[in-house]
Amino acid sequence: MKRIILTSSSGVVLTHAGRADMVVPLICRFVSGPLPTSHHLEQYLAGHYTRYDSEVRWSDLVARSPETGLAHRELPLGWFCKAYGFDLIELWFDPRSNDQLLLIWILDYLRSEPYMAERLKLRLVDFDLPGADAAELRHRNVREFDVADSDFEMASMAWEAYRAPTPELCFGLLGRNLPRLPFLKPAMEELLAELPSPISGLGATEARLLDLIARGHNRTKELFQPGGLLETRVFDQWELGPLLEGLASGPMPAIAGLDSKLATLAPHDARGRNAAFRRSRLSLTEFGRAVLEGRDDFRRHNPIRRWWGGTLLTNDRLWRWDRESRSLVAP
């Protein structure tokens, strides 16, 4: 039986676990910045490289196969699975936010791919894939089930909710019964908690960041590294830098000590930016302490323009999340 696994970039470890003939890590990120357009996502799964094509495709992290060589680099994902006769297509996505968003997106896509949809199995991965050991994964019992039409429908509804221009539909998901997607609601609540607080104007990760700096943790390496003090299950280490910059800039910054060179470095200059972050020695401003203690609102004094799913947050259209009452607060 020929088997292919679709997973996230966190599931690269499955490549070495010997559980499938091919492992495809999908490397899209949906938790920060504007969402990719439907066209961009279709192109991502389409393949069809050209000589001057610099776009990322589904096959970029897929190893050469003894049977198919590099043929996967030329074909759409659906065509490739059918052409090489995969009998079983497994979905391995762990409980973290971006993995759950990837899961509902790929289910929405596979709904219109009959060959793949008929051979689909969903694995209930109730552990974090990045910390898993390949040898242990080879024999680990991970519950699976067939994907029903109702699962496709629920995934499509949830994906459309996340892409909507307000977070209201996502909030509505918290009241739904989702027995076949058990990790989606906790992941959605973690995402909603990243909306600004009605009191401090900080999202959950921003508040945690200020709290750690207040406790004397002033180096970005110990804050940002995987498994570090920040312990965020929403953002990866590359998404934490812009979050920190947002708190350290504006008319009334909450954080001081960020290396000034960051303001002049291009966003794609990963080496230069990483060095500047490492040189930084962070501390809270007096305003930052007031925000952390709930005595002032960061967003009241600083401009905001950032994306939460399909919602563009601005000072005029600022949706907030009340963590105490677990409720959404409209602008």
Image: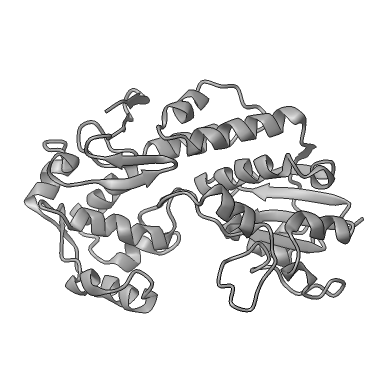
**Going by the image, does 153 lie left or right of 121?**
left
Task: Name the quarter where the N terminus is drawn.
Answer: bottom right
Q: How many marks?
A: 0
Q: Residue at (76%, 49%) from the top-left corner?
A: 90
The image quarter in which residue 153 lies: top right
Depth check: give the residue in front, 214 or 155.
155
Q: Residue 262 appears at what percent x and percent y? A: 24, 71
Q: Is residue 263 left or right of residue 88?
A: left
Horizontal side of residue 47 vs 89, given as left or right: left
Q: Is residue 150 above or below residue 210?
A: above
Residue for point 65% across, 60% down: 25
* x and y percentages locating residue 111 in the rendered image: 73, 39
Towards the viewer: 26 or 77: 77
Position of residue 47 measured from the top left corner of the image (x, y, whole percent): 69, 64
Q: Position of residue 85 (x, y in %)?
A: 90, 57
Asked whether the viewer can see residue 95, the reply is no
Q: Is residue 98 visible?
A: yes
Residue drawn at the location 21% of the way across and 69% of the way down:
263
Image height of 229 relative to 117, above or below: below
Q: Which quadrant would residue 5 be assigned to in this image?
A: bottom right
Q: How is the image coloured?
A: one colour
Residue furthest to the left: 286
53, 229: nearer the viewer: 53
> Which quarter of the figure is the C terminus placed in?
top left
Identified at 71% across, 65% down, the residue is 15
In the image, residue 276 sits, relative to residue 254, either above or below, namely below
**Residue 285 figure quarter:** bottom left
